[in-house]
Image: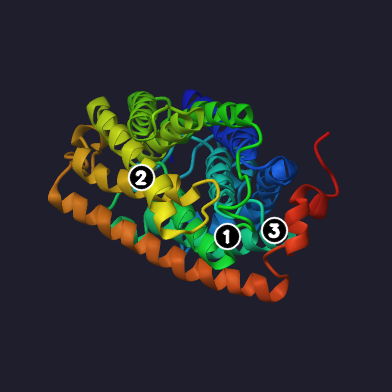
Amino acid sequence: MRPIDTGDTAWMLISTALVMLMTIPGLALFYGGMVRRKNVLSTLVQSFGICCLVSLVWVTVGYTLSFSTGNAWIGDFSRVFLRGIADHFHQGSDSAFTLGAGSAVPTPMTIPESVYLLYQMSFAIITPALITGAFAERIKFSALCLFTVLWSIFVYAPVAHWVWSPLGWVAGLGAVDFAGGTVVHINSGIAGLVCALMIGPRRGLKRDDMSPHNLSYAIIGASLLWVGWFGFNAGSALGANGRAGMAMLTTQVAAAAGGIAWMLVEWWRMGKPTALGIISGAVAGLVAVTPAAGFVLPSGALAIGLIAGSVCFYSATVLKNRLGYDDSLDAFGVHGVGGIVGALLTGIFAYGPLSATADNPAGVSGSWTQLLHQGEAVAVTILWSVVVTALIIVVVNKLVGIRVSDDDEQEGLDMTQHGEKLN
């Protein structure tokens, strides 16, 4: 066991707080600003409620299923209710632990397990919160709560174990995911698309005015997401080191490139660059660079951001309109598509020396072989998310009913689900 490094631990504590900032208030305000006035509070509460629910799921079974020893498919129950988390305190030790999380993570680590599990908890929280953008303004709060618990256990935890555990079979294929392109963004984006298709569109879509209530909220939320993303990506180096610095730099470059790309394409096609467009493009760039942040140089991040901003513009506007599904706030269009773009481009732009270790001195470099491995990880994540998410929706609908009534939807979820409304 290696001694705890106070600098690494301090950086990871800060990174954890930054990722928590992404969900509450970042994502809450980002989504809350894009819905109609009668649904603003319910949208904010969805992110806040998910934060509470997933925190408890994580300390009971989520962490142990994701990161304890187990096998190639799932973790065991050795850390259920965080059992054994305080052993090193009782033993008078000031050593870190040896749990690893795939090729992007040093093993053994230099931070306490309590910090590592809390950092990973923040990822587990934001992932189902992202899904809510796909079915905004039409789901029962009771259904959301049940869906979140089941999805966190049966979709998020297995995929996290496959990709980030040292024993995970997807990691064994040679695929890499530095900070959550597959585990967080493809997983949530694909689940969002399944939800949007199975739940159905909002009443009055393409007939009623669905304009965002307050884009100021959305811009503030997107800004908080951008800042919090530094903890999301640079924190995934699990230490205050050169790789964290490079990951932070590539994150900034990709976000800026994504915002500019979406803005220019929209300006060209629609005649005006919108506020919603540039913030959506920045988020698309952030999403796409997430799996790549610790593997690519700034030039690669620039390319990833430009490509993601352009592709996500088409998926969130042209593709959605042509196919007719109601991905209300573009959970699939930005996170699903952006995650796929970023995961695949990691296989092209990865720069080996950034990920070099004693066990793998060549690191992970872009090649056709690596691109194939990335494609395998993308396909596996899509398949699992589609099948299990669909099953969960069926179960939730049977147990509590998943969609509000027409009258409740017309009145708004703020009043019908929470008995409150904006003044």
Secondary structure beneath label 1: loop
Q: Position of residue 360 (x, y in %)?
A: 21, 43
- Circle 2 packing at 10 Å, graded few (<14), some (14-19), many (20+), is some
Disc 3 on helix, strand or loop? helix
Q: Are marks 3 and 2 in contact (CB under 8 Å)?
A: no
Q: Is residue 269 left or right of residue 53?
A: left
Residue depicted at 50% across the width and 69% down the height: 388
Q: Which residue is mark 1?
A: 201
| Badge 1 or badge 3: first in the primary sequence | 3
Residue 97, percent from left and from top: 48, 43
User: Above or below — where is 366 with respect to 413?
Assistant: above
User: Which residue corresponds to the image point at 73% horizontal and 63% vertical from the top-left?
Assistant: 406
In this view of the protein, which residue sits in the foreground, 81 or 317?
Answer: 317
Q: Nearer the viewer, mark 1 or mark 3?
A: 1
Could you give the CA–CA distance between mark 3 and mark 2, rounded to whole angstroms? 32 Å
Badge number at residue 314: 2
Disc 3 target residue = 145
Residue 94 x, y percent position in the rendering: 55, 34
Query: Is 45 situated left or right of 241 in this image?
Result: right
Q: Is residue 370 above or below residue 400?
A: above
Between 322 and 257, the one lying in front of the other is 322
The amino acid on which the numbered mark 2 sits, given as a three-letter code, is Tyr
Residue 333 % position (x, y): 43, 48
Q: Is residue 308 left or right of residue 361?
A: right
| Residue 165 in view (yes/no) | no
* Disc number for residue 350: none
Mark 1–mark 3 Cα distance, whole angstroms, equals 20 Å
Residue type, mark 3 in image? Cys
